[in-house]
Image (cartoon, rainbow, N blue to C red):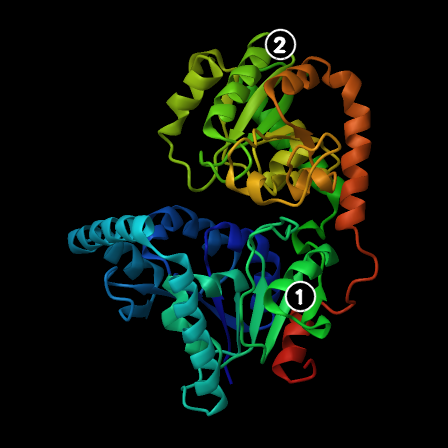
């Protein structure tokens, strides 16, 4: 009998990055993996990353919409057919129409009505499943992020997903803060298992979804179950190769900027972002010791390079900075320091004991207005900074001071983030069973 797993690649490529170690285990145990792409809007962005997915794991089929305006037009087929479909003129035209409709909807949406509709769909689906009125999906289990259940684009799949064991894995390494305005969300508890990177997320899941303790399984960060020293040694070659290609000194140290799209949500306002980039550019321009490696977020466009050069006030031709396609773990293993606005990249950096400065400019940003985390001066901050996984920076003066005197601050920063990682993710007592063993116990009803 063929063993099959459904993997929902949503909300973005980050879901795969966090799941790939587990998906490899599933592959190696003889399971065929199909990938569901529920969001047509993300198809072109994901297509750029699917090649990496296929290099890492064996994928049997993709499940995708052939008509962006028809949520019932999902088709199961090979990657080559997916590439063909999304390049067709009619698909592109319909996708543009969908984008216009979504923009209009987002401006006029009534969130309370939307949540009520999603609740009715979820609750109704649970009743239909209890009465065995829904045909079971032809998979042994599904891996997804439970927060996606509250997205409209997944509603056509909810009733069928409730027919098989659901394994939830968060698409990022953020330690959830329970925001002041966060609302509870109902979910079908039958055959549900939540994988956690750290037990510090337990309050969020229990409060939001009313999840029982036996449905929460702490697995740690599977991507960090590697020989760290061997990775660093191996990646010295990558570091030397970059320096040679760019004509840099062998003693040059890399500073990585883990970027993200500009918004008024994630702690750093667009105005603050510009101030920080100018400060970074000034430091890099005036130093011969450092080179800035920029890692764009998957949702950022390549055209951002010229804008980035302008905001940094660094000419591209000077080779003071460059854009990299290396993974965050590879960058953490070769960098001296990290910079970010708000990103779980700091967790990977703290694993390698490399400090990452989290540049926030919280004025009027959504998360800053809603967070329960504040520093000793009463300034809002992210859970990363609160748990010492990143070094919090609240204004350009602080950033300038840290960068100018980084050699003095470095030992203290290193110690702080190392202890932060140990406190949150270096868990000695989590389940002795592997994620795959936990999944198979769930399938066999050995975990209630």
Q: Kindly identify which numbered label has been placed on residue 127.
A: none
Instruction: Estimate the x, y position of residue 215 in percent, counting from the top left.
Output: 67, 72
Instruction: Estimate the x, y position of residue 8 in percent, counting from the top left.
Output: 46, 63
Q: Residue sitting at 47 percent across and 66 percent down?
A: 149
The foreground one among 192 and 266 is 266
Picture layout, residue 120 above or below residue 134: above
* Mark 1 surroundings within 10 Å by alpha-carbon count, few (fewer than 14), some (14 through 19), many (20 or more): some
The foreground one among 48 and 13 is 13
**In the displayed structure, does residue 421 sit left or right of residue 155?**
right
* Secondary structure category for the residue under label 1: helix
Instruction: Estimate the x, y position of residue 65 in percent, counting from the top left.
Output: 29, 63
* Mark 2 surroundings within 10 Å by alpha-carbon count, few (fewer than 14), some (14 through 19), many (20 or more): some
Q: Residue sitting at 25 percent across and 59 percent down?
A: 68
Sequence order check: which comes first, mark 1 or mark 2? 1
The foreground one among 63 and 268 is 268
**In the displayed structure, does residue 210 sit left or right of residue 138?**
right
Q: Residue sitting at 47 percent across and 85 percent down?
A: 127
Where the C terminus falls, by quadrant? bottom right
Residue 200 in view, yes or no: yes
Q: Residue sitting at 60 percent across and 12 percent down?
A: 283
Q: Label 2: which residue?
A: 288
Q: Are marks 1 and 2 in contact (CB under 8 Å)?
A: no
Instruction: Estimate the x, y position of residue 253 in percent, counting from the top left.
Output: 66, 20
The foreground one among 136 and 85 is 136
Question: What is the quadrant of residue 167 in the picture?
Answer: bottom right
- The extreme bottom residue here reads 131
* Secondary structure category for the residue under label 2: loop
Residue 61 in view, yes or no: no
Picture layout, residue 209 above or below residue 270: below
Q: Label 1: which residue?
A: 206
């Amino acid at each position: 009998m063929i063993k099959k797993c459904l993997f929902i690649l949503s909300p973005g490529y980050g879901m795969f990055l966090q799941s790939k170690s587990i998906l490899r285990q599933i592959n190696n145990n003889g399971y065929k993996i199909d990938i569901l792409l529920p969001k047509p809007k993300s198809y072109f962005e994901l297509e750029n990353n699917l090649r990496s997915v296929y290099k890492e794991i064996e994928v049997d089929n993709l499940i995708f919409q052939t008509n962006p305006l028809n949520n019932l037009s999902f088709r199961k087929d090979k990657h080559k057919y997916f590439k063909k479909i999304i390049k067709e003129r009619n698909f592109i035209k319909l996708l543009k129409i969908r984008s216009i409709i979504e923009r209009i909807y987002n401006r006029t949406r009534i969130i309370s009505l939307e949540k009520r509709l999603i609740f009715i769909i979820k609750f109704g689906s649970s009743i239909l499943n209890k009465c065995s009125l829904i045909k079971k999906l032809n998979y042994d289990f599904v891996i997804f992020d439970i927060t996606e259940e509250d997205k409209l684009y997944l509603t056509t799949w909810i009733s069928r997903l409730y027919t098989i064991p659901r394994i939830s894995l968060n698409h990022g390494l953020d330690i959830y803060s329970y925001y002041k305005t966060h609302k509870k969300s109902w979910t079908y508890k039958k055959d549900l298992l939540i994988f956690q990177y750290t037990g510090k997320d337990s309050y969020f899941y229990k409060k939001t979804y009313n999840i029982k303790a036996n449905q929460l399984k702490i697995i740690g960060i599977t991507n960090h179950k590697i020989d760290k020293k061997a990775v660093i040694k191996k990646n010295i070659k990558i570091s030397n190769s970059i320096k040679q290609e760019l004509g840099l000194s062998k003693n040059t140290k890399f500073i990585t900027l883990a970027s993200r799209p500009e918004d008024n949500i994630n702690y750093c306002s667009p105005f603050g972002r510009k101030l920080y980039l100018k400060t970074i550019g000034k430091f890099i321009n005036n130093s011969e010791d450092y080179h800035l490696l920029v890692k764009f977020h998957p949702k950022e466009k390549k055209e951002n390079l010229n804008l980035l050069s302008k905001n940094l006030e660094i000419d591209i031709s000077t080779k003071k900075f460059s854009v990299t396609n290396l993974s965050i773990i590879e960058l953490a293993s070769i960098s001296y320091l990290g910079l970010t606005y708000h990103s779980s990249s700091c967790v990977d950096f703290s694993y390698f004991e490399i400090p990452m400065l989290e540049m926030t400019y919280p004025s009027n940003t959504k998360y800053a207005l809603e967070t329960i985390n504040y520093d000793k001066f009463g300034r809002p901050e992210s859970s990363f900074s609160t748990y010492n996984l990143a070094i919090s920076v609240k204004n350009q003066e602080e950033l300038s001071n840290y960068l100018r005197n980084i050699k003095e601050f470095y030992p203290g920063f290193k110690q702080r983030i190392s202890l932060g990682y140990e406190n949150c993710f270096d868990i000695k007592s989590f389940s002795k069973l592997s994620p795959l063993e936990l999944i198979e116990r769930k399938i066999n009803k050995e975990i209630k």
